Structures are given as C-alpha cells and as structure tokens.
Amino acid sequence: MDQKRILVVDDYPQIRNLIREALESEGNYEVTEAENGMEALKLLKKRTYDIVISDVMMPIMGGLDLLESIKEVQPTVVTIMMTAYPEVETSVSAMKKGAVDFIRKPFNLDELLFKVNLSLRKRQALSEEELAKNVKNLRLQDECEDLSLRNYIYDAIENSFGDNDYIFKDVVELALKVVGGRDCELLLYDAEGRQFVPHIIKGIDSETYCVKILPQIKPMLEKVAHSHESVIINSAELPEIFPSVICAPLMIRNQVFGVLTVRKKECGIQFSKKELDYIQTLTRRASLNVENKVLYESLYRNLIDTFKSLVASIQVRDSYTEEHSYRVMEKVINMAKNMGCSTEEIESVRIAGMLHDIGKIAIPDRILLKPDKLTDYEYKVIKSHPGIGENILKSVMLLDREREIILHHHERYDGKGYPSGLSGDDIPFLSRILAIADSFDAMTTNRPYRNSMSINSAIRELRKNGNTQFDSHLVECFLQSI
C-alpha cells in the first residue's frame, strides 16, 4: 500500500506523540502534527492528506470549526474526531459536519489503529468519480441545511407579533434552538451610563446570572457595544463562565440598543463560526423588525394625533361630538375586551370609536347644530358623515379596517340603515359593536333638541330594537360590559 499522509491535531504534545509513534510503527504512514485547528488548516492548504485525526476542544480553532473548513479545502479527506466529552450532541454535531468516526478519550490505541486502517480501506475502495459525487452531495446537503435554517430564522422573526418584549422573547428562544445553547440572555444597553440591563434571561436563574456571570462578561459586552461586532469567547480556565459564548449586538440606525449572549451547553464544545453567523443573522433581522416597528408606531402616532386634532376642531362648533366620541370609544373598548376580542380588534375599535364622527367636520353648522327636527334633505346631509369620514381616512393604508368600521356603523341589522343597506352578518362585526355603543351614548346624553333617557330606558330601547336595528346577541354582550 502506498504511503498515506495522516495529520494529527491536538493541543497536547504527549497525545500527538503517542498517536504518531503508534501509527508509524503500525504501517506505512507519514504523520504530521498540528496543535490547533488553525495550524492544521494552514497545513491542509499546502498539501493533501488522507486522514485527519483531530481533538474537538482546542484553543484558537476547535475541531468542529476545523471540520467545517476541511469541507472547503480538502473535502475528500477522512476525518476522525477525539474528545473527552463524548456527549450525544457532540457526536451528532461532528457526524453532521463530516466526521466518519468518533473516539472517546482516553482512547485505546488498538481501537484507533483499527479505525484508521478501516477508514483508509473504505476510501481506497471508492473511485475518484464516487468520491467526487460524495463531496458534491455533501456540499449540496450543507447548502440546503444552511438555506433552510436561514429561512426559518427570517420567517420566525417576521412572524413575531406584539410589543418589543414578545419579539425579544422570540429572539432568545430562537437563539437557543439555532445553536444549541445552554442559556441565553438579552440585555438592553444604556449608552449614556454604559450599563447593560438584563431584560430577558433564559436557561439560568436571574440571581446567578446577575451576580456571577454578568460581572465576568461585562468587558466582552463593552467591546461588542463599542465595536458593533459580534464575538466568540472560549475558555478552558473559566468553563463555568466561558465554556463558549457568543455575544452579538442589536442595533437601530447604527446605534447599539441591546446585546444578545448565548452560552454553549457543554464545556467541551465550542461555537463554530457558522453558528456565530446564524446568531448575527438572527440579531440583524430582529433589529430590523424592531426598527420597522418603532418607525411604524411613530408614523401611526403622528397620524392618530392629526385625526384627534380634527375631531377636537369639531368641538369648536359642537362640544357634544368630541365628548361623545371619547365616551363611545371607552364603551366599545370595554365591550370588545369583555367579548374576548383580539388585541388587533380592540385597537381597531379604539381608533374607530374615537374617529367615527370625524365626517361631521364637513356638515354645515346650520344642520349639525340645528335644535329642531331635521328636514328630509338635512337628514340626508347628516347621513353622509360616515362616507365623508371614510373618505378622510382613505389615503391612510394603515387604517383600512378602521375605515370600514366607520363607514358601516349606521347600518341596521334589518338592512334599513345607511350608507349601503347591509343586513345581518354582512355588516362588519366591529361596526355592529360600534353601532350599539354609539346609540346607547346618544340616548343617555342631552342634545339641543331633546333630553337624555335614563339608563334603564336606554337598555329597554336597545333590547326592543334587537334584530331590527341591532344584533340582539351583541346587545346582551354590550349590556354585560356596562
């Protein structure tokens, strides 16, 4: 058999010498040594090897990182991994990255020699064409796995709804899944005070983290906040603190507002550069999500403030309208909450309740403020206010649902309402809720042309008009909320 080249990678010289002597005495092997993954990678770039025997846990570059790199520089080389930490997860991770076998330290030399011999024979039995095909399949598998994981990260963050706390919790949970972390923390950064405030802690009790871990990793956090770059720290000296830690910034407009830290489950396994890349992908997507949410909320608040000002401007002409709008808003929110409506539905009826009479801004004073009975023409003008309100909001895409609620809040359950003559369940659900709250408040407050009803009289009126003007089921739901 031709002389085979074997590269032995371990940070302990005694182990390298032991393996070298055993191999050289056993067969026709040329053995080269490297003390870490980085040194091994340099050798692999200069000449070809038949087998790499590598430890998992090493300084500078560990065995799993080396495995990733081997697939790029010499994809057909056989790799056997050694470790003193033979947990199932380590073995699976090594096999997925391309190792053909796994040996536990302290190892039996006969077992090592047997596996080296067997691996070489298997490799020799394959033709060059078969080896090339295996390499191609392995690379394709890696690319598919990588793309699938990145798509999973994108989708998970894009589908993360709710306030920032919900997004942050999703980020922490996702980070643990993606890289197999032992614990994960999201800290908010106060740049002025240079303080890192733990906001979400997962996988470790908060007291242990704040008292024991945080003071030790603060220099790393400061480095990340200052450089805006993610880092990995590995330490055999402080395995309880730094078994292997990824630290990545969360940024908006190039300003760090938080830092994500993930610690590895086992002290014998280091995070790889690819895992660091996945965490960076996660933090960048999360930062973008939060930034878009902040911009959306800022725009949203500005729009709502503008429309509030429009409603307030009606008060100059008719003090009833603004006060009525806010009372209706409170009633319809209570009803929606009592019925178990979603957060989005409650927010929609809040806005629709506040703005439902905004169209009255276009109604002439002589009609809007008339103390006597309206003529048919004047009533027709009054009935135009839902459509006018819908038109005022039409240019705002953010308020599509609210526009629909406002447009149809004067429809009747029997189809005799306006502006579209919708009936029954064809009337939007939230419009039916708003119609009841609107009518109840109108009946129980004084107007220039009539006095208010008592609450009991208004309740009887609502029930009397159930399934004609109002949805009778929703009437009962409303009455339970007042």
Image (cartoon, rainbow, N blue to C red):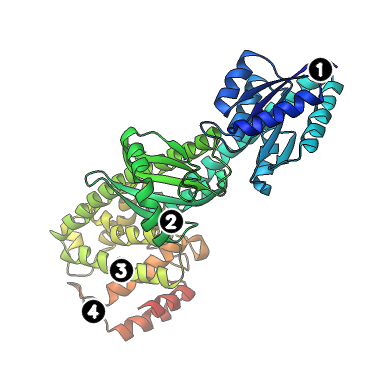
The residue that disc 3 covers is 330
Residue at point 36%, 82% (across, down): 459
Horizontal side of 71 relative to 375 (left or right) equals right
- Camera-near label (1 vs 3) is 1
User: What amino acid does circle 2 point to?
Assistant: Ile
Density class for disc 4 (Cα within 10 Å; few <14, some 14-19, many ≥20) is some
Looking at this view, name the residue that lies furthest to the bottom. 456
Label 1 – label 4 distance at C-alpha: 92 Å
Disc number placed over residue 373 in the picture, else none:
none
Answer with mark 3 or mark 2, whichever residue precedes in sequence: 2
Q: Quadrant of residue 208?
A: bottom left
- Camera-near label (3 vs 4) is 3
User: What amino acid does circle 3 point to?
Assistant: Glu
Disc number placed over residue 201 in the picture, else none:
2
Q: Tell whether label 4 touches label 1 (CB within 8 Å).
A: no
Density class for disc 3 (Cα within 10 Å; few <14, some 14-19, many ≥20) is some
Residue 27, given in percent of the width and then of the height, sits at 81, 22
Looking at this view, name the residue that lies furthest to the left. 316
As helix, strand or loop, the secondary structure at mark 1 comes to helix
The residue that disc 1 covers is 129
Answer with mark 1 or mark 4, whichever residue precedes in sequence: 1
Is 298 in front, or is 449? 298
As helix, strand or loop, the secondary structure at mark 4 comes to loop
- Camera-near label (2 vs 4) is 2
Answer with mark 1 or mark 3, whichever residue precedes in sequence: 1
User: What amino acid does circle 1 point to?
Assistant: Glu
Residue 69, given in percent of the width and then of the height, sits at 60, 26
Answer with mark 2 or mark 4, whichever residue precedes in sequence: 2
Label 1 – label 3 distance at C-alpha: 75 Å
Residue 45, given in percent of the width and then of the height, sits at 61, 16
The residue that disc 4 covers is 452
